[in-house]
Each structure stands twice: as C-alpha cells, then as structure tokens.
Image (tube, coloured by chain):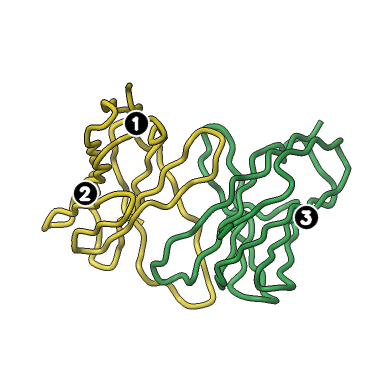
Amino acid sequence: DAKTTQPPSMDCAEGRAANLPCNHSTISGNEYVYWYRQIHSQGPQYIIHGLKNNETNEMASLIITEDRKSSTLILPHATLRDTAVYYCIVRLSQISSGSARQLTFGSGTQLTVLP
Amino acid sequence: NAGVTQTPKFRVLKTGQSMTLLCAQDMNHEYMYWYRQDPGMGLRLIHYSVGEGTTAKGEVPDGYNVSRLKKQNFLLGLESAAPSQTSVYFCASSYDSFGQPQHFGDGTRLSIL
C-alpha cells in the first residue's frame, strides 16, 4: 500500500467547511483512497473512498487530483461532533479472493472543531 | 440497522483466565476481521474470515483463536490470557476484499491483570 502523509493537526470553526489534505505521491493505478475517522473511545468509522473520480456522500466529499498524488476530504459544515482523528489510507482495489490484509492506519490528522 | 456489534464492551481478567469476545454484523457481509489497537501501534489484524466456516491468521495471531460458525458472528477467544493481551479489540466486516470498506464495531476494552 502506498504511503500517505497528513498534517498532524488542524482546527476548524463550527459551521465552516473542514478541508483535510492527504499526500500519496507513490499511489499506483489500482489503489483506492479511503478516509476513516476515529472519535475518542469509539471504533474507526468509514467516511468515503474513491479511485479516480471525485466522490460525495451524506458525510463528506472526496476530491482527488488529476495525477492522483493527493486528495482532500471535505466536511462541508463541521460540527463539534466531527472532532476526531482522520485517517487517509491508500489500498489496493483488488486482492485475490479468499484472502485479506489488515487496514493500516497511519498517524492521521487530529481535527478539532471549535465553537 | 445496528451494523457491527461487539460484546462485552469492557472486561477485566486475571492472567490465565479464558474468555470469548463476540462480534455480530447484520449487513450480510462475507468478510469479518478482528483487530487489536494499542497506544502508538495502530490497528493490527489478529485473524480474519472470508466466509462462514473459514478462518485465517492475520499479522498477530498468537494467543488467540477464532470461529465463524454463522455468517453473522465472528468469535475471538483467549484460552489463557496474558498481560500482553491488554488492549482494545475491534471487530470489522466488509462485503468483499475488492475495494469495499471495512465497517467497525465500537470495541471491547480488555484488561489482563
């Protein structure tokens, strides 16, 4: 899996958009970009993933650059409950059926939403 | 829709005792996983299952056993607990291994004295 680089921490005002960057310059063509978050004392929560195109769901938007070497997770209207550690993970889109590998979380970005 | 449910949420054991952690998912997922999370270590895969009746070793399987007798349940057993197994244990499930995300439970906090 390609290595990812994220800023260790970010602040965001409540109600504003939170834009979390991730660099993955060694990503290969068949690797997805996944975003998870972990709120203190809870399990990791899946947010969104994408391969090449930008993606949007009810939680967030994922913007992937054309060269796929970086991406940005956007929380359009951050709330206090969005305070968490956010993880960007790059992972192969296909492995052989019948096998699995661990989901490797790096250090992530501690997002603090301020009132 | 409960997603992934883990029981118990907390447990304290004495060294040498045994116990079983239960994971249940209601998403009809084929793949299920057990991870442990320790400070500064990130998530480490203990065992996983690619379908009912199957199990396989992950990165750190020693000291643990698992069973997947029903598609919706994945059990993690500690036969003789050791202090090194003090950790937070997370169960996850996914539809497949071809890009679908893993969905996690809220964890079991286990302390071995």
In the visual, does A87 lie left or right of A66? right
Task: Give the green chain's letter.
Answer: B
Label 1 residue SS:
strand
Between disc 2 and disc 1, the foreground one is: 1
Query: Is A94 situated above or below B45?
Result: below
Query: Is A78 situated above or below B34?
Result: above
In the visual, does A10 lie left or right of B11? left
Which chain is indicated by disc 2? A
Let me know if marks 2 and 1 both belong to one chain: yes
- Labelled disc at residue A111: 1
Residue matched to label 3: B77
Chain A colour as displayed: yellow
Q: Are marks 2 and 1 in contact (CB under 8 Å)?
A: no
Q: Residue at x 79, y 40 (%)?
A: B82
Q: Residue at x 40, y 48 (%)?
A: A36
A91 or B89: nearer the viewer: B89
Residue matched to label 2: A71
Name the image quarter holding residue B46: bottom right
Crowding at dot 1, Cα within 10 Å, few <14 / some 14-19 / many 20+, comes out as many
